[in-house]
Amino acid sequence: MRAIIQPSNISGEIFAPASKSSMQRACAAALVHKGISVIHNPGISNDDKAAMNVIEQMGAQLKIKNGELIIDSTKAFIHSPFTNHHSPVQINCGESGLGIRMFAPLVALHKNEIIINGEGSLLTRPMDFFDEIFPQLGVEIISNNGRLSLKLKGPLHAKNIEIDGSLSSQFLTGLLMAYSAADAGDITIKVNDLKSRPYIDLTLKVMKDFGLNVPANNNYETFYFKSSIVSRQSAIINYTVEGDWSGAAFLLVAGAVAGNISVKGLDINSTQADKKIMEVLKDCSCNISINENEIKVEKNILKAFHFDATDCPDLFPPLAALAANCNGTTVIEGVHRLAHKESNRALAIQQELKKMNVEVELDNNSMKIRGTKNIKGAVVHSHHDHRIAMMCAIAGLNAIGETVIENADAINKSYPNFFEHLKMLGATVLTSNI
């Protein structure tokens, strides 16, 4: 798909999309919870659909009723790991990095040989973590030199273990879910150099909301599972998926550079890492009003900022679009977190913004962006990365001339309604399946 963005002033109000971070974790927790879960405000992104597909392949029964997702995991094979029933030959996680890292340990609870695969950029993302960790937990694994596909044969046995958390917190999320499903007791996971701690806060909160065995946390360095006699099967679980701060960050930046908008449906008390976008908007002199039910953002003269995005690397693309519109040179730290995303995201940001007359310098772990009043419309490419496509669209709102985004359908991974939402706010956006 190609998207054409005309310079536009925007206004009005919009509801944030459902958080795929919250939605995917809810699917995993509903699988571990032996019974029925009702998911309110379920997500519709490709990653959300992949998570639903995975738990269905693992034996959960799903149906949509009155806009709610109902999950019955009673017959899911993780609750009877030594049987041969409902064991899929192959599970596909789509293009979801969280999906593969979270569901692989749950799949490994089963004794049968199961193949886990994915699509697109996920096929090139490193999975060496599992090659190292699974054998320590009694799981046989064959990978493609640290990449997909993975051939697993469990069952996984929860044990005291020490892991490296420097690449991604998503591996820890998977182990926490699996240890809870395995009824781990008096067992500790030690984590070295954990990144993206807020995402672990989200994982622990979702586990608690679903009544799972939640480990005690000692400064994110150890996670201790106490023996629990509480059954995972209980009354029906009702869970509401939060609004997505990651997707909403693009909307909030759009308001800061091109208009006066109100974004609703965000929880200001959320544990989502990308909530930090509000700190940046304040620092760069954006006019922002934060209320319990909505956040209002108004265009203003913006100044450069300095921000460490190590714990919230998904903010790099919206922050880059924001920095392009600021007076002065912005510095964003945490570039090392960007190499293994849907694209090499640091290089993608640099290459595409350069086409739009925005200078981006990569200096070890820092990204320096020199703001300009002469952002130019250009033909750009998403690099098949949803956040790069959205970055280019936001930068294009305040550009001179139109911006053409190739492979713009990458947005479907996290925010399928993104271009429609921009149009609802008054932006001139044309999409075509060319």
Image (cartoon, grey):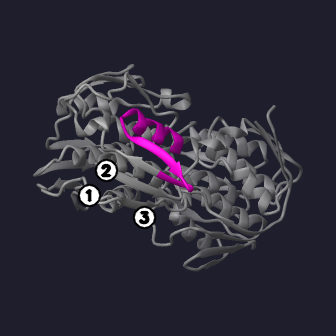
Q: Where is residue 204? Give x, y as percent.
A: 32, 58
The reply to whether residue 300 is visible in this rendering is yes
Amino acid type indicated by mark 2 = Gly
The residue stretch that appears in magenta: 48-69
Q: Nearer the viewer, mark 3 or mark 2?
A: 2
The reply to whether residue 286 is visible in this rendering is no
Q: Where is residue 111? Give x, y as percent.
A: 22, 27
Disc nearer the start of the sequence (1/3): 1
**Nearest the eye: 304 or 243:** 243
Outermost residue toward the front in this view: 65
Amino acid type indicated by mark 3 = Thr
**Nearest the eye: 261 or 256:** 261
Outermost residue toward the right in this view: 401
**Nearest the eye: 394 or 70:** 70
Mark 2 and mark 1 in contact (Cβ < 8 Å)? yes
Quadrant where the N terminus lies? top right
> In the structure shown, which secondary structural element does the residue marked by tag 3 occupy?
loop
Q: Describe residue 69's horizontal placement relative to residue 11 as left or right.
A: left
Does 83 sit above or below residue 215? above
Disc nearer the start of the sequence (1/2): 2
Q: Residue at x 17, y 55 (%)?
A: 224
Q: Describe residue 135's horizontal placement relative to residue 6 as left or right.
A: left
Q: Name the residue under label 1.
A: 234
Does 300 sit above or below residue 100? below
Q: Mark 2 points at which residue?
A: 35
> In the structure shown, which secondary structural element does the residue marked by tag 1 occupy?
loop
